[in-house]
Amino acid sequence: MTDLIITKENQGVFTIILNRLDKKNALNNIMYKELGLHLNYAKNNDNIHCVLIHGDKNCFCAGNDLQDFIECSQDDSLAALDFIRILNAFNKPIVAAVAGATIGIGTTLLLHCDMVIAANNTKFKLPFTQLGLCPEAGSTLLLTRLIGQNRAFELLVLGNVFNAEQAKEYGIVNQVCQPNELLSIAEKTALAIASLPSDAVMTSRKLIRQATKSSLAQVIENEGDEFSRLVKTDACKEIMSMFFKR
Ligand code: COA
């Protein structure tokens, strides 16, 4: 592992810090590989209940390393794609804290997160077509579902810059704050998630994601199956029994 990605663990929260600030946290091939390894570690570690990802209070991520794209040859598979697959298959809540440059995959990865806190200095941009590329990371589905076809076109094809308040209005961001409050708010949010009963959180997260894929009838069945299972667990019974011991 390099120091381009730093991780730490605290009270069930696994924090992933993008640490390539001299390059505005542009993600290179090594960083994608390490991000994938860290997510797999978090997935397989029962003590981790939530992941927090951030850069610093002035920069989240300037997108893919453009030099790596330039050097990419016909036969190379893209490290970004492997990372996206791992991110999409991830099963625990992810909180992201963003600021400053939040570009390309720096924005599209947020569509896979569960809560996003943005500093009011954040500048989002999806400059895919401007670079001769097309949108990635499922953003044509995920963003279109959030804001509709026309506004998705504006952001994904025109590549207009948008700010934190707009991102909140679009439903990409949960909360906008001052840059110097960003990391503490995000940490508090991640700790609050991590302190909840983890099976219930992971199951609810799964249901939220399934709900957008399935028909309403199927969603009701999915919820019903998991509700019936959860209501029979010791953890759930313990919580409910506390109600009667007040
Ligand atoms: N890939 C590789 N290097 C990048 C990068 C990227 N995506 N984004 C920034 N950098 C590097 C710059 O080359 C520069 O390196 P240097 O100091 O060795 O010259 C350093 O990071 C600082 O960037 P700079 O452009 O000087 O900072 P800025 O504050 O003026 O602008 C950005 C910041 C993010 C707006 C600007 O760097 C930018 O537009 N980057 C490209 C974003 C992009 O198109 N990403 C791909 C999306 S698919």
Image (cartoon, grey):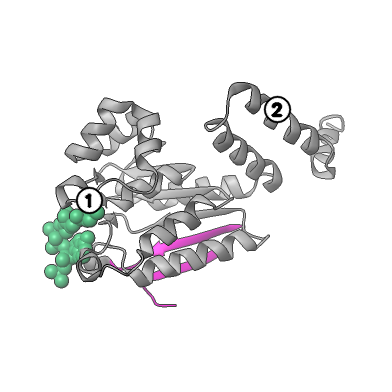
Magenta-drawn stretch, dominant element (helix, strand or loop):
strand
Q: Residues within 10 Å of mark 1 (few under 14, many from 20)?
A: few
Question: The residue under label 1 is which amino acid type?
Answer: Leu
- In the image, is residue 15 part of the stretch drawn in magenta? yes
Q: Where, quadrant-wise, is the C terminus in this rendering?
A: top right
Is residue 41 shown to the viewer in this render?
Answer: yes
Q: Where on the picture, by quarter, is residue 70?
A: bottom left
Q: Residues within 10 Å of mark 2 (few under 14, many from 20)?
A: few
Residue 170 or residue 126, whichever sits in front: 126
Q: CA distance from mark 1 to mark 2?
A: 40 Å
Range of magenta residues = 1-20
- Residue identified by numbered label 1: 133
Residue 6 or residue 138, whichever sits in front: 138
Would residue 92 be found to the left or right of residue 5 on screen? Answer: right
Q: Where, quadrant-wise, is the N terminus in this rendering?
A: bottom left
| Above or below, 120 relative to 50 | above
Dot 1 beta carbon under 8 Å from ligand 1: yes
- Residue identified by numbered label 2: 221
